[in-house]
Image: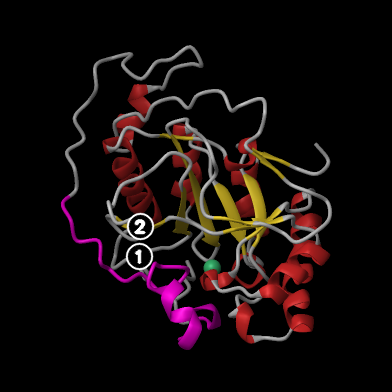
């Protein structure tokens, strides 16, 4: 299978003002800083993860070497974030909630591992995909399979530029272009936008608002290969945190696969007792 080597133009070196955001891992090549131990995956007592909302299929989790995560609570009827159809788009690094949940976002789209679809089908963990057209255009259908599991597709530009370094007109081409293609390919207009490398400026907010998405979504943790990079000094997950991961394969993960990386991510979440909820269930779109 043809595999992107990670040397594509969306991995171009950047400098200056975006260096700070790169330090926390926004779509840069994996730093390989995750050198900690991998936790043992001892089985929990049968039924320990059951709640009124349902139960995990423990056998399917064991198939992937995992202990089931808690079933997430029902999302609040009164959404903690309500987006407006007009005005400056807000920026979120987390969502305000007192529920013990975190949200997983997966960016770009160059790795298209069939095993990851199988894993998501088995585990029923919600993800939000921020897709960049250059990465997904060889195989739009791959992401349709993930969408069919209930996962939402959001905007991440056509070509992955450093948005804060290009003029407004170019920024609009990037956001509106991806918006148009994603809407056509996946049948629904993205509500959210993530800037490549996390780099944005006031023109980005204008471009995003004019192209359709109603919020910019940043993150609090960035998944590497084994561990997460945390922005908070206590190096822990917190209620409502947004976690950044990427569609990456062995060439970007020092030989690890997408499913191995994702299993490590779920272990880090499980160790800290969090459930994974669906980001879009906590956000009210202007349409209601
Ligand atoms: Zn990216």
Residue depicted at x 34% and y 53%: 261
Q: Which residue is mark 2?
A: 257
Q: Tell me the quarter of the picture where residue 39 sits.
A: top left
Q: Is residue 129 left or right of residue 205?
A: left
Please provide percent x and percent y for residue 124.
Answer: 49, 33
Q: Is the distance from the Cβ of mark 1 to the nearest ligand 1 atom less than 8 Å?
A: no
Residue depicted at x 76% and y 81%: 168
Q: Is residue 67 above or below residue 47?
A: below
Is 178 part of what is drawn in magenta? no
Q: Tell me the quarter of the picture where residue 77 sits.
A: top right
Residue depicted at x 43% and y 80%: 19
The answer to whether one can see residue 158 in this image is no
Query: Where is the C terminus found, in terms of image quarters?
Result: top right
The tag on residue 93 is: none
The residues colored magenta run 8-37
| Predominant SS along the magenta part | loop
Circle 1 crowding by C-alpha within 10 Å: few under 14, some 14–19, many from 20: some
The tag on residue 250 is: 1
Do callouts 1 and 2 mark residues in contact (Cβ within 8 Å)?
A: yes
């Amino acid at each position: 299978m043809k595999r992107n080597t990670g040397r594509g133009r969306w991995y171009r070196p950047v400098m200056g003002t975006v260096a700070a955001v790169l330090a926390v891992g926004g779509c840069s090549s994996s730093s390989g800083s995750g050198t900690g131990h991998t936790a043992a995956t001892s089985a929990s007592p049968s039924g320990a993860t059951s709640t009124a909302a349902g139960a995990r299929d423990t056998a399917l989790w064991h198939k992937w070497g995992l202990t089931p995560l808690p079933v997430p609570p029902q999302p609040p009827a009164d959404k903690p974030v309500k987006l407006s159809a007009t005005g400056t788009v807000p920026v979120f690094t987390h969502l305000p909630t007192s529920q013990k949940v975190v949200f997983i976002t997966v960016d770009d789209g160059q790795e298209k591992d069939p095993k990851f679809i199988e894993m998501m089908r088995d585990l029923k963990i919600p993800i939000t995909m921020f897709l960049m057209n250059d990465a997904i255009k060889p195989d739009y259908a791959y992401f349709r399979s993930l969408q069919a599991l209930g996962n939402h597709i959001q905007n991440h530009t056509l070509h992955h530029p450093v948005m804060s370094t290009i003029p407004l007109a170019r920024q609009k081409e990037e956001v509106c272009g991806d918006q148009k293609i994603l809407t056509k390919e996946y049948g629904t207009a993205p509500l959210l936008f993530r800037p490549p490398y996390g780099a944005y400026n006031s023109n980005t907010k204008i471009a995003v608002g004019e192209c359709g998405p109603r919020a910019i979504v940043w993150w609090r943790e960035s998944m590497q290969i084994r561990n997460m990079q945390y922005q908070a000094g206590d190096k822990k997950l917190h209620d409502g945190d947004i976690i950044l991961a990427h569609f990456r394969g062995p060439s970007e993960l020092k030989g690890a696969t997408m499913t191995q990386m994702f299993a490590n991510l779920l272990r880090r979440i499980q160790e800290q007792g969090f459930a994974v909820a669906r980001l879009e269930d906590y956000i009210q779109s202007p349409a209601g």
